[in-house]
Amino acid sequence: MLKGLELARGFWEEHGAPAVREAFPEEMGWLAAGLAGAGSDCAGWDDEVSRDHDWGPGFVLWVPPEMDSRRRFALSALYDHLPGEYRGWPVERHSRLGGGRFGVKTWEEFFRPFTGCAGAPETWRQWMALPSWALAQACSGEVFYDGPGEVTRIRQTIRDGMPEDVRRKKIAARAALMAQAGQYNVPRCLRRGERDAALLATGEFVREGLYMAFLLNRRHMPYYKWAFRALRELPCLDELAEPLGKLLTQPRQETIEAVCGRIAQELRRQGLSDGPWEYLEPHAYQVMKGIRDPDIAALHVMEG
């Protein structure tokens, strides 16, 4: 099946790149092109269902923030004069300058909606506060061409640059929240006959368990509807997709404990905790002990 990334790359290579090289050869060293951001096509998970909105040929043309408006407008006009159809699919024709999914954007305009700054997060507080899905979208997709290399550098920093102390703090919070929701609250709710409350607690456990799996893989968890899809593609802990999925309809304590046991095992394997416990709360405090930054170490165990 034709994928959006394939369509975007072909549109750039067959029409976009030749047009820019012919009309503005001096600009090729200052711009980048690719497909990234929100959308299942950027992650490579698009299918027939995805084609009902925000799907089709197009690419982002990233330019430096300091590029003057006249040059940007000229590039935008060139984009608008590319073929209106590619491989049988219509090309979107609006919001070419600074808005929409495609067209000409400075890399600051592109990254700011995801990171709140001109590029990658700059402080540990920013890394701590930003939602995982936003970071995942900022480094999704592909860069087809990058003259100055800046877009590639920013994306690489977002993908791999989370400070280790921040990662540890987020892992500690997940461990504490998983213990509270799944190992403590679910069985208490079930003993009281409060199945609705047990299901809510189980949902919290599943959400935190998903997030934990991505943190232990040093990956950003995508938007929730793609979390299970992405989990199955992780190199480690991908086997948790099945038990976590089953918990959404059947809150079984033995399943929760099996998931926690596997998480505890991975915490020990990565040297984040050396405790023998299956209960995750004491692991949270063990992970906290490995944080070197005193400001991060002073945060509440569940913060992050």
Image (spheres, rainbow, N blue to C red):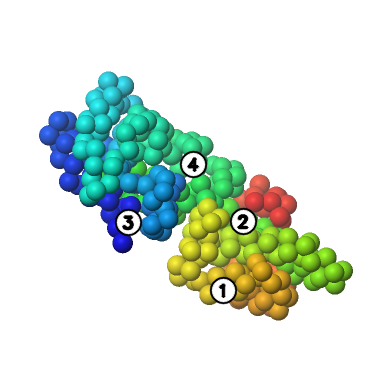
Name the element at disc 1: helix
Q: Secondary structure at mark 3?
A: loop
Q: Is residue 111 left or right of residue 286?
A: left
Q: Nearer the viewer, residue 267 or 245?
A: 245
Q: Secondary structure at mark 2?
A: helix
Residue that mark 4 sits on: 114
> In this orientation, does residue 289 appear?
no
User: Looking at the picture, how far across and down is residue 280, in whole percent?
Assistant: 70, 69
Q: Up-down: is 95 above or below 224? A: above
| CB under 8 Å between discs 1 and 2 | no
Q: CA distance from mark 4 to mark 1?
A: 30 Å
Which mark is first along the chain, 4 or 2?
A: 4
Q: Which residue is mark 1?
A: 242
Q: CA distance from mark 2 to mark 4?
A: 19 Å
Residue lying furthest right in this view? 192
Quadrant in the picture for residue 262: bottom right
Front position among marks 1 and 3: 3
What's the distance in space between the residues labelled 3 and 4, CA to CA?
Answer: 24 Å
Is tag 3's residue or tag 2's residue first in the polypeptide sequence? 3
Residue drawn at (31%, 61%) of the image: 1
The disc placed on residue 170 is 2
Task: Name the residue beneath numbered marker 3.
Answer: 3
Discs 2, 4 touching: Cβ within 8 Å = no
Is the C-beta separation of discs 1 and 3 under 8 Å?
A: no
Dot placed on the residue nearer the N-terminal end, 1 or 2? 2
Residue nearest the observer in this picture, 141 or 271? 141
Instruction: Identify the image quadrant of residue 29.
Output: top left
Please, what is the three-letter code of the amino acid marked with disc 2? Lys
Q: Earlier in the sequence, mark 1 or mark 3?
A: 3
Q: CA distance from mark 1 to mark 3?
A: 27 Å
Q: Residues within 10 Å of mark 1 (few under 14, many from 20)?
A: few
